[in-house]
Image (cartoon, grey):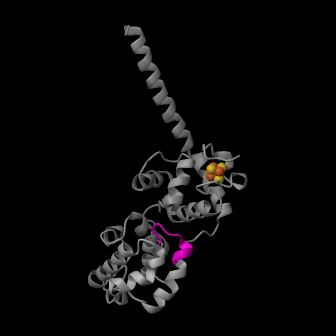
């Protein structure tokens, strides 16, 4: 290849990379982020966790049950479950097969039963029956990854330890081009840089409700979307 052609190709590639990074910067510009926060505040001013619970342990169990399952389904199972087994000690004493029967309808019941009994056992043995309040102490519990730990810390204790990245947050932050990352952990790292810490808990709840009510995975209700003017996702329907 003649030298001139090769150098012009390199220059074009460099220009493309520069323009892509400038575009990404404009998607995450402070003014755009403020508009997103304001629209979410207006539409979902009191967004909260939809999982029914009366304490941190119940929320931990409900969050483990919510993996690959709807919150509505979990909320049908947990009132009776928590009536029969109110404390971590009750779960430690429970045979795994018995718990599997109780939570069968939430799916993946064998793994979930194992995780719940395992987490309850460590909570009783290592933390005197109280759910611990730090990410470092929660993450080693069976069935607990960052998403579950963030739900428990944020909702039960009001501790902003990170941003919950569930299926809704993952989908919507990609549609809004706030991140290009391909794993929930890396998406969370991006969001923790873009969203002020005092919004981490509310932003998670707001985006989850936004995903449930408007920005569905299939056929999102773009005509009713308060973020429509800020969105140029290929999934947009208007
Ligand atoms: S315009 Fe549509 S795709 Fe974009 S954020 Fe709103 S509902 Fe989602």
Query: Where 140 falls versus 237 (above or below)?
Result: below
Give the percent coordinates (x, y) of residue 61: 42, 78
**Which residue is farthest left?**
125
Query: Where 187 falls versus 90 (above or below)?
Result: above
Give the percent coordinates (x, y) of residue 168: 54, 59
**Residue appearing at x 45%, y 50% in the figure:** 190
Give the percent coordinates (x, y) of residue 98: 37, 86
**Residue appearing at x 41%, y 20% in the figure:** 10
The reply to whether the magenta stretch includes residue 231 is no
Q: Specify whether 238 is left or right of 12.
A: right
Q: Is residue 35 visible?
A: no
Number of marks present in the image shown: 0
Please state which of residues 23 and 32 is positioned toward the viewer in this rendering: 23
Please state which of residues 103 and 186 is positioned toward the viewer in this rendering: 103
Query: Where 43 falls versus 158 (above or below)?
Result: above
Give the percent coordinates (x, y) of residue 36: 61, 53
Q: Is residue 217 visible?
A: yes
**Residue appearing at x 48%, y 27% in the figure:** 16
Please state which of residues 222 and 41 is positioned toward the viewer in this rendering: 222
Quadrant location of the N terminus?
top left
Please state which of residues 96 and 231 is positioned toward the viewer in this rendering: 96
Q: Specify whether 237 is left or right of 20.
A: right
**Residue appearing at x 51%, y 76% in the figure:** 74
The part of the image, by quadrant, that contains residue 119 is bottom left
Question: Which contiguous range is marked in magenta?
Answer: 66-74
**Which residue is farthest bottom?**
84
């Amino acid at each position: 290849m003649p030298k001139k052609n090769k150098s012009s190709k390199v220059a074009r590639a460099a220009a493309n990379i520069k323009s892509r990074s400038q575009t990404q910067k404009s998607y995450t510009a402070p003014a755009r982020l403020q508009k997103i926060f304001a629209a979410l505040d207006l539409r979902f001013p009191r967004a909260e966790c939809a999982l029914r619970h009366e304490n941190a342990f119940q929320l931990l169990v409900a969050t483990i049950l919510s993996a690959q399952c709807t919150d509505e389904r979990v909320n049908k199972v947990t009132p009776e479950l928590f009536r029969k087994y109110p404390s971590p000690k009750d779960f430690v004493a429970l045979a795994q097969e018995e718990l599997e029967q109780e939570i069968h309808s939430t799916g993946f019941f064998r793994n979930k039963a194992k995780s719940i009994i395992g987490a309850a056992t460590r909570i009783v043995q290592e933390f005197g029956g109280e759910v611990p309040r730090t990410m470092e102490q929660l993450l080693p519990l069976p069935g607990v990854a960052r998403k579950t730990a963030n739900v428990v810390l944020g909702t039960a204790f009001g501790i902003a330890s990170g941003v919950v990245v569930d299926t809704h947050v993952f989908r919507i932050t990609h549609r809004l081009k706030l991140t290009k990352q391909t794993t929930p952990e890396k998406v969370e790292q991006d969001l923790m840089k873009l969203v002020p810490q005092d919004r981490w808990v509310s932003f998670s709840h707001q985006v989850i409700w936004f995903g449930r009510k408007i920005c569905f995975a299939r056929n999102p209700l773009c005509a009713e979307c308060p973020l429509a003017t800020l969105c140029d996702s290929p999934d947009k329907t208007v």
